[in-house]
């Protein structure tokens, strides 16, 4: 064989780190899809939610700040983000009811800027790393050496997606969320408290963003502009079909995998185009996304 | 009469955007009755039902359900008070399965055993829903979707059902079938019904009492059989043509309530 075993191992490591990055994109994309499904609005601040969740966790857990135990800090940060999501809907988004969708979109873009600057003002603009109990540990499978963080990111993401998938399939609240997104008026008729359900969806999106933030900050440094990778996650959601939770995750994984391989194969500068080129191709050849749930309404 | 009505609407006013769609309508529904509201397109029938069920807010007037004021309540609270609105047309959840659509009708309840029994009851009235239980509701035909909406309404275990044009867009045979089932539900399950219809003929056949709604106000009301025999109702809502002396239809006939 012309190619040595070292080459295969390199490839494996590229795949794993691509999947780990892709998991974070996938989780942000999940946030996009959740809010889009439930309210037909797109939350362009989802990436900044992720960044905010990461900073809240760093603030709680890192020794230079509060230094709370990691396993207490993480659920606490997730809860804080869920409450923030709920309150955001209750006091801001709900007031926009009846306004055109574009108003909500502009609002969330503005919100992203606000989060970025507020976080910068509080915790400074330098990159920071979340200190986790498993930092620097490695997993060895034969000759393959994997960062513990990367494996954890992939596993947690898969579990969370599975949980959300089952939640929407089986749980009463999950079904009510689906129902409210498919036909809001009919949801009122069957006695679903639609407004509260929508606030709960924002809370869920906040919690998912916090998980993404924890995972991201444990495998690499975050700074207030990290939230801009929400744009890549947006591409992931589009590739996945924007209406499908597993689709969002797979879209994220696709983008995560494309990046390292594009960087490997293409000259620097061109490789960053790759995720968006894929999004463009998907939009041209399968406009509803790979896992689209869209269906034409009967007239 | 001594029995107080289950549902009592007094001087209700409601706006559809800037338009005053309901202009001081009053009506009452007694326990066990089927009461129908007749009216042409744009008379305000749907707006009236939406206001009663809390999906739209009342600007003025009162709505009492079993003597309790409900006109400031949210729609989901009113469903918990056992009054459910079965909307017109195809207001279903298209991507959920037929079974999920029916069972989400019981969203406000938690008595599992009774919910299961009610599911069987709904399937016994509408066997087609049991047959199609697993397929997405969006793939049902118009008549089946109407049955689904009624079945879903029943799952809230309502004492009062507000039915908005169950005959809309259905073939005469299907209309007959659905109204037969409605009448059975009324007698067998003791569901009091307020039925809004354009199809005055079928509505008056099943109803005990009827109101005529025009331009957002009640212009006439009487027992259903009296309405059925009223000249005005016959010519304006039942399409009965009166032969005049000259053998032609009087085209400038005035309604007696104008």
Image: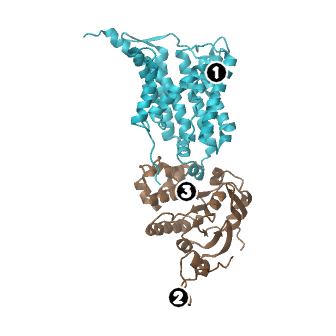
Q: Residues within 10 Å of mark 2 (few under 14, many from 20)?
A: few
Q: Which residue is rendered at x = 64% and y = 26% of the image? A: A113
Element type where label 2 sits in the image: loop
* Res. B41 image quadrant: bottom right
Q: Which residue is mark 2?
A: B247
Q: Residues within 10 Å of mark 3 (few under 14, many from 20)?
A: many
Residue A165: % across, % down:
48, 35
Between circles 3 and 1, the one closer to the viewer is 1
Query: Spatial distance from mark 1 to mark 2, Cα to Cα?
Result: 86 Å
Q: Against B80, is A131 above or below?
A: above
Query: Spatial distance from mark 2 to mark 3, Cα to Cα?
Result: 48 Å
Q: Which one is in front, A154 or A21?
A: A21
The disc at residue B153 is 3
Element type where label 3 sits in the image: helix
The disc at residue A16 is none
Point out the tag, 2 or 3, that comes first from the N-terminus. 3
Query: Spatial distance from mark 3 to mark 1, Cα to Cα?
Result: 45 Å
Dots 3 and 1 on the same chain: no
Q: Which residue is mark 1?
A: A56
Q: Against B247, is A5 above or below?
A: above
Residue A237: % across, % down:
49, 32
Dots 2 and 3 on the same chain: yes
Residue B40: % across, % down:
59, 68
> Which chain hosts label 3?
B
Chain letter matching colour brown: B
Q: Which residue is rendered at x = 58% and y = 29% of the image? A: A46
Q: Against B46, is A122 above or below?
A: above
Seen as rendered, the residue at the extreme left is A1
Between circles 1 and 2, the one closer to the viewer is 2
């Amino acid at each position: 064989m012309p190619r040595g075993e070292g080459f295969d191992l390199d490839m494996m490591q590229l795949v794993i780190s691509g999947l780990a990055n892709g998991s974070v994109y996938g989780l942000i994309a999940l946030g996009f899809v959740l809010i889009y499904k439930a309210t037909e609005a797109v939350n362009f601040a989802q990436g900044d939610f992720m960044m905010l969740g990461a900073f809240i966790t760093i603030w709680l857990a890192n020794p230079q700040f509060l230094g709370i135990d990691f396993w207490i800090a993480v659920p606490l940060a997730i809860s804080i983000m869920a409450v923030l999501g709920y309150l955001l809907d209750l006091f801001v988004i709900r007031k926009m009811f009846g306004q055109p969708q574009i108003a909500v979109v502009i609002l969330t873009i503005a919100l992203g800027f606000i989060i970025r600057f507020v976080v910068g003002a509080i915790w400074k603009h330098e990159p920071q790393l979340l200190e986790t109990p498993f930092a620097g540990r490695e997993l060895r499978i034969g000759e393959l050496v994997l960062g513990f963080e990367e494996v954890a990111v992939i596993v947690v993401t898969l579990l969370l997606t599975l949980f959300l998938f089952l939640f929407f399939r089986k749980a009463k609240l999950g079904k009510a969320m689906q129902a409210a997104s498919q036909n809001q008026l009919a949801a009122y008729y069957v006695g679903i408290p639609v407004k509260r359900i929508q606030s709960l969806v924002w809370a869920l999106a906040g919690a998912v963003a916090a998980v993404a933030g924890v995972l991201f900050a444990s495998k690499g440094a975050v700074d207030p502009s990290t939230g801009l990778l929400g744009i890549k996650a947006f591409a992931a959601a589009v590739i996945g079909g924007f209406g499908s939770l597993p689709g969002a995750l797979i879209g994220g994984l696709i983008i995560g995998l494309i990046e390292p391989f594009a960087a490997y194969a293409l000259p620097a500068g061109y490789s960053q185009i790759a995720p968006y080129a894929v999004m463009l191709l998907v939009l041209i050849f399968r406009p509803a996304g790979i896992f689209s749930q869209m269906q034409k309404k009967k007239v | 009469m001594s029995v107080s009505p289950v549902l009592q609407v007094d001087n209700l006013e409601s706006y559809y955007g800037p338009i005053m769609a309901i202009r001081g309508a009053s009506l009452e529904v007694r326990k066990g009755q089927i009461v129908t509201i007749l009216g042409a397109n744009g008379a305000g029938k749907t707006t009236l039902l939406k206001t009663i069920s809390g999906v739209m807010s009342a600007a003025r007037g009162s709505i009492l359900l079993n003597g309790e004021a409900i006109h400031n309540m949210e729609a989901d609270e009113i469903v918990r008070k056992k009054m459910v609105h079965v909307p017109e047309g195809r207001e279903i959840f298209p991507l959920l399965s037929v079974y999920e659509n029916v069972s989400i009708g019981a969203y406000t309840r938690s008595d599992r055993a009774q919910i299961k029994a009610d599911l069987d009851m709904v399937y016994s009235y509408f066997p087609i829903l049991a047959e199609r239980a697993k397929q997405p509701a969006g793939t049902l035909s118009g008549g089946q979707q109407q049955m689904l909406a009624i079945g879903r309404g029943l799952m809230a275990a309502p004492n009062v059902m507000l039915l908005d044009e169950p005959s809309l867009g259905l073939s005469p045979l299907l209309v007959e079938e659905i109204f037969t089932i409605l009448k059975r539900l009324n007698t067998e399950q003791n569901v009091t019904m307020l039925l809004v219809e354009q199809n005055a003929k079928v509505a008056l056949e099943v109803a005990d009492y009827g109101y005529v709604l025009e331009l957002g106000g009640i212009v006439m009301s009487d027992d259903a059989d009296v309405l059925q025999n009223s000249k005005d109702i016959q010519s304006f809502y039942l399409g009965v043509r009166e032969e005049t002396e000259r053998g032609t239809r009087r085209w400038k006939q005035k309604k007696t309530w104008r």
